[in-house]
């Protein structure tokens, strides 16, 4: 099976061509044809953040949003409010991390609670990824909250830029800024060690979500690969994650039976419904 020589895509997860004697997926071909100017993107992020006075930060209680909160407060000195959207399946350890980190940084924390069971139940029953629908709904709730508060900026803990920019425009004049744009794992962990962040014993590529492990297992059983592959491949492509580590991240997760049972029971899913 051909595997891209630059990222981690193989023939199951991406179209692979032989280019100058090397296998390359279509996404890497586009990346090489139109390489991002990383220095320009980083400068654009810094210049933009130097203009941000007040912002809300989408705070999941995970490692990346914790690093983003640190940067907003300590590096850019923004008057920032951490806003957690608790979708009903945020791990209690993540909520505890959120409270500790926000208190440590002297940042106000607001927790808004909603029920995303419809998204998660559909994803598990159909062996799909819940992440896109969850993220879309969460960003909309953050956008409406920002509008209500009269705040123009929403900061998030994402590493991959929007094309060649670290931001995108949302409806209502709101700007989303990916605060970790082009920050590699080593840089993130260096900051994380400064914070009272405790790694939870969750499963799947997550430090906050109870759903993702069970969803990854279902998806892997149906398709034979992880729905996180494309995102993690992008991290490798941008030089933000080691290729060997990335391949470990997309292996089939081992989910403890009691954790899976808890998720299924909470969603009203019985074993015979997913066979």
Image: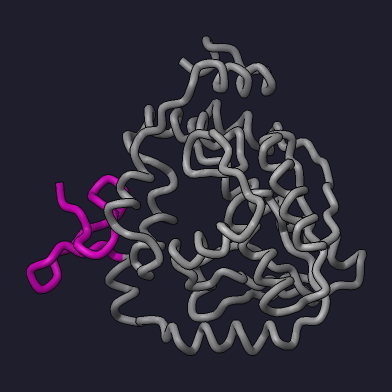
Q: How many marks?
A: 0
Using the image as rendered, state which of residue 177 and residue 107 is in the foreground. Answer: 107
Q: Position of residue 69 (x, y in %)?
A: 69, 64
Q: Is residue 226 left or right of residue 173?
A: left
Vertical placement of residue 148 versus 230, above or below: below
**Front position in the image: 52 or 94:** 94
Task: Please identify the quarter of the rendering in which residue 192 is found.
Answer: bottom right
Q: Quadrant of residue 178?
A: bottom right
Q: Is residue 30 visible?
A: yes
Magenta stretch, main secondary structure class:
loop
The residue that appears at 76% across and 82% down in the rendered structure is 52
Asked whether residue 172 is in view, the answer is: no
Q: Residue at x 64, y 52 (%)?
A: 135
Image coloring type = one colour
**Residue 239 shown in magenta:** no
Residue 33: image x %, image y %? 30, 80
For the view shown, which residue lies furthest in the top direction? 272
> Which residue does the image show at 84% across and 65% down from the upper left?
146
Magenta segment includes 17: yes
Write the residue at 35% across / 62% down: 236
Pick whichever, 123 or 36, lies toward us: 36
Q: Which residues are magenta?
A: 1-26
């Amino acid at each position: 099976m051909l595997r891209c020589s630059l990222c981690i895509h193989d023939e199951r997860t991406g179209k692979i061509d032989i280019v100058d004697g090397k296998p390359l997926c279509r996404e890497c071909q586009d990346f090489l044809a139109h390489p991002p100017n990383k220095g320009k993107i980083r400068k654009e992020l810094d210049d933009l953040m130097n203009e941000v006075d007040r912002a809300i930060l989408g705070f999941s209680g995970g490692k990346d949003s914790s690093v983003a909160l640190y940067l907003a407060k300590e590096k850019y000195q923004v008057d920032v409010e951490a806003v957690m959207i608790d979708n009903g399946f945020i791990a209690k350890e993540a909520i505890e991390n959120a409270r500790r980190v926000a208190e440590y940084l002297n940042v106000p924390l607001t927790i808004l609670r909603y029920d995303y069971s419809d998204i998660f139940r559909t994803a598990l029953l159909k062996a799909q990824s819940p992440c896109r629908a969850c993220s879309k709904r969460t960003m909309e709730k953050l956008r409406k909250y920002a509008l209500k508060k009269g705040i123009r900026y929403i900061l998030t803990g994402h590493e991959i830029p929007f094309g060649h920019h670290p931001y995108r425009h949302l409806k209502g004049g709101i700007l989303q800024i990916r605060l970790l744009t082009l920050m590699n794992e080593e840089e993130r962990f260096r900051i994380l060690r400064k914070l009272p962040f405790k790694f939870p014993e969750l499963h799947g590529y997550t430090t906050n979500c109870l759903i993702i492990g069970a969803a990854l297992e279902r998806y892997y059983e149906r398709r034979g690969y992880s729905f996180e592959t494309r995102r993690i491949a992008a991290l490798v492509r941008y030089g933000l994650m080691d290729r060997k580590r990335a391949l470990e991240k997309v292996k089939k997760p081992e989910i403890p039976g009691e954790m899976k049972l808890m998720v299924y029971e909470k969603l009203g899913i019985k074993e015979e419904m997913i066979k």
